Amino acid sequence: MNDNILNIKDTKFEKTAGGFVSMDLAGTFYKRVKPIRLFPFTDPSKYIAIHDEKDVEIGVIEDLAQLPKEAAALLQEQLELYYFTPVISKIINIKDEYGYAYFHVVTNRGECKFAINMGGNAVSKLSDNRLLITDLDGNRFEIADVLALSVKEQRKLDLFL
């Protein structure tokens, strides 16, 4: 067995008064921990690293399904906050100006505007048709299927494909 894998029987998670998560691991208390997906796109509920307040890895949970339902729900809530990624369903406009691209889009969370640095690697291809876009503030946006967009919208993305 891997030394990094946490023993679920020795692990207890609780929500703190501030809305964060604490963990007791076989008698060692961590007042605030952060779950991080090791495979965020291919296996989002498996191999969850647990980091302490100094961002040092404590260990890994192999599968959230192994945890009691309340603990799994608590960690899932934290993961959704950390990996908040609105999905773009419509591109209203993309304007390229002075090395930046200004997006005006509609997402599953509503209409929004954001900017990316054209010189960086702000647009990542996750597959042939799936894109992840990271704006100047580090916010992530996903286009689940470029081919689901209209031809006009796809042309606006040509610069990034």
Image (cartoon, rainbow, N blue to C red):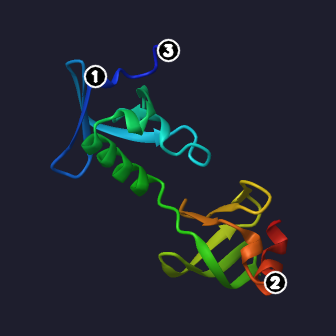
Give the quadrant of residue 119.
bottom right
The Cα–Cα distance between marks 3 and 1, rounded to whole angstroms, is 16 Å
In the picture, the quarter occupied by the C terminus is bottom right
Would you identify the image quadrant in which residue 136 lies? Answer: bottom right
Residue that carries the numbered disc 1 in the rendered image: 9
Which secondary structure lies at badge 3?
A: loop
| Residue at x-position 29% and y-position 47% | 74
- Local secondary structure at mark 2: helix
Name the spot of residue 48 as percent of width and height, x first: 46, 36
Residue 135 appears anywhere in the view: no
Badge 2: few (under 14), some or many (20 or more) residues near its Cα, within 10 Å?
few
- Give the left or right position of residue 130, taking residue 27 as reference: right
Observer-nearest of 159 and 9: 9
**Which one is in front in this view, the residue at disc 3 or the one at disc 1?**
1
Do the numbered discs 3 and 2 sit on residues whose CB atoms are within 8 Å?
no
Residue where numbered disc 3 is placed: 2
At x 40% / y 33%, what residue is drawn?
50
Which badge, 3 or 1, is on the more N-terminal residue? Answer: 3
Residue 151, numbered circle:
2
